[in-house]
Image (cartoon, helix red, strand yellow):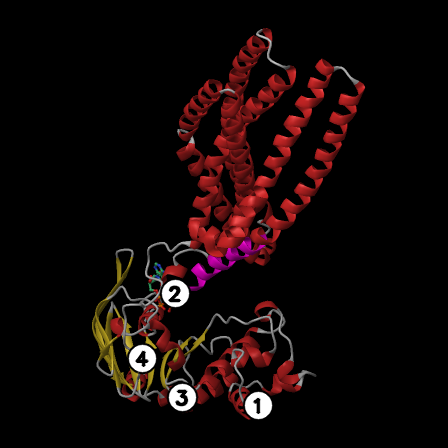
Amino acid sequence: MRELLLKRKSRFILYVFACLFPVIDQVLKNYSFALLIGSIEVATIDYFIKVLMINIAITLLGILLFMASRFMRISYMRDTILDVRLNAFDKILKKSYEGFSKKSKDVYISNLVNDVNIFEREFFFKLINVIFRGGAYIASIGLLMFMDFRFAMVMLIISLSVFFLSKRFEKRTVKLQEEVSDNNESFTVGISNTLNGLEILKLNRLEDEFLYKSLKKVDDVERKKFHFTVFTEGQRSLTRFLGYVIFVGILMYLLNLAFAGESITRITFMLQLANSCVWTIGMVLPLFNDLKAAAKIYNKITKSDGEATTSINKKQSFSFNKFIEVKDLRFSYEGKEILKGASFTIEKGKKYLLKGPSGAGKSTLIKLLSMIYDNYEGSIKVDGVDFREIKEDTINDHVSYIYQDVFLFEDTVKNNITLFKDMPEKRILKATKHAGLDEFLATKELGLNEPLMENGKNLSGGQRQRISIARAIIKDASLLFVDEGTSSLNQELGSAIEDTILSLDSTVIAISHRYYEGITEKYDYVLELNNGQILQHQSQDYLREVAV
Ligand SMILES: Nc1ncnc2c1ncn2[C@@H]1O[C@H](COP(=O)(O)OP(=O)(O)OP(=O)(O)O)[C@@H](O)[C@H]1O
């Protein structure tokens, strides 16, 4: 939190000063009010007019101070909130794929929207109040020390006692704010799931059931917010009540001074200063707890979860010229063993067809070979270098993927294929031709510049798949992973695309449940995954055996 506020140190100091401007205004107003009351005692029209002029001048000064304070604070707050959003986004982007996929993406959306909003709403509003009230308290107690040292010391001791009392509420306040944040996450995930499956819900007339579930989640969020508000307001009420009790004591003491002959102006001014101390006790102390809660939210959305987000200890870069050797590979999901000592070798330039029953672990194996997971046993080495020593980001330039689930950006066909890189048009057209996109592009007035809707909503499944295939082809990567890459294409196009994939120079490791006559035989090897083990076959032999 401190590093965020002090990132712009001089502007933060200016911000604190700006928050203190109203303190000057308040002290001056207290004094001018005391003069006004005191004018009853003096009882001359000249004195009254003088006091009135002072009051008007102080009111005008107050307006100027308010405007200056706001102007000086606003840009600092705006830039700091922008930093919070950037830091929160940065934390998500720096996550490893494995770390990222542990939570639903909607949790991250909730962090970026709900939590940032909580922070924005709570933090600066509370901070300005703490600084202003804290400043007013120090100014008031300082002036009181000049006027009546003993009285000021008693006020100080009372304030410290209430401060320690309110500290006892801190833990619970932070916890309740965290619960609000967690419930916001769960609500966002629930709503997103409902919207994602809306088509199925409508077709099966399940809307009411899901509406009820959503309402329940809204209810949970609101209940948590209510608990938080009740608890924080409860604190405020308690400290306010203590404030009233203290105020009655102060009033009795000042009445005694008045009976002893102290001037009305002085007594009124002391009353105003003491009042400002009492209100500080009543209002600032609970705000400290609210600030702590907002800071906790900031840490939650911007600080690392403790998982390794970068590969700082890894020194090697990915380079694949000969072999990838997998030895005795074991991998489990939460105790469920998927790979049980698989060993095989991938030779550069060869084409591998990964076969196995549904749920055998084929996609998992591809994730391990593309360095998405690293919590495995055994070893994976590329040209003799252990995967665990290779920086994850260095593999990206060497690997392409064609998956069944295609992600498309809300941008042109061209940018979706080149992934926003500058590439010669000739190279793009070659890739679109190989991916079977020519016919589709010919129907579009803007051709490659045809805009796509969010995730390619305006395309058919096959068209989306072909764009992803062109994206993989154009990358010209040394290693190409294909997971059911042609499943949404018809037999004719699927076989043509698979033929294209097999004609690339890349080493191909593909999962496919489809058999294309005369094409599938072009794979060099079949890796058969069964019961966590890999059996490597010459593809011709394997396919002949299966056909029999
Ligand atoms: N992130 C995950 N967390 C926990 N279990 C998982 C996860 N991903 C996959 N599994 C489980 O691991 C097993 C292997 O899944 P995987 O997707 O690798 O199989 P597959 O052979 O590709 O299956 P299919 O041919 O049906 O796509 C399955 O039982 C699956 O339920």
Location of residue 357 by image quarter: bottom left
Residue at 47%, 58% (x, y): give it: 87
- Give the labeled residue for mark 1: 425
Where disc 2 sits, the SS reads: helix
Mark 1 or mark 3: name the one nearer the start of the chain. Answer: 1
Where disc 1 sits, the SS reads: helix
Label 4–label 2 contact, CB within 8 A: no
- Give the left or right position of residue 513, taking residue 343 as reference: right
Q: Viewer-proximal residue, 218 or 522?
A: 218
Mark 4 or mark 3: name the one nearer the start of the chain. Answer: 4
> In this rendering, is residue 507 above or below 117?
below
- Give the labeled residue for mark 3: 502
Where disc 3 sits, the SS reads: helix
The amino acid type, in three-letter code, at marker 4 is: Phe
Work out how far the residue at label 2 is from the one at label 3, CA to CA, in angstroms: 28 Å
Q: Which residues are magenta?
A: 78-95
Work out how far the residue at label 1 is from the one at label 4, CA to CA, in angstroms: 29 Å
Work out how far the residue at label 4 is from the one at label 2, CA to CA, in angstroms: 17 Å
- Give the labeled residue for mark 2: 97
Mark 1 or mark 2: name the one nearer the start of the chain. Answer: 2
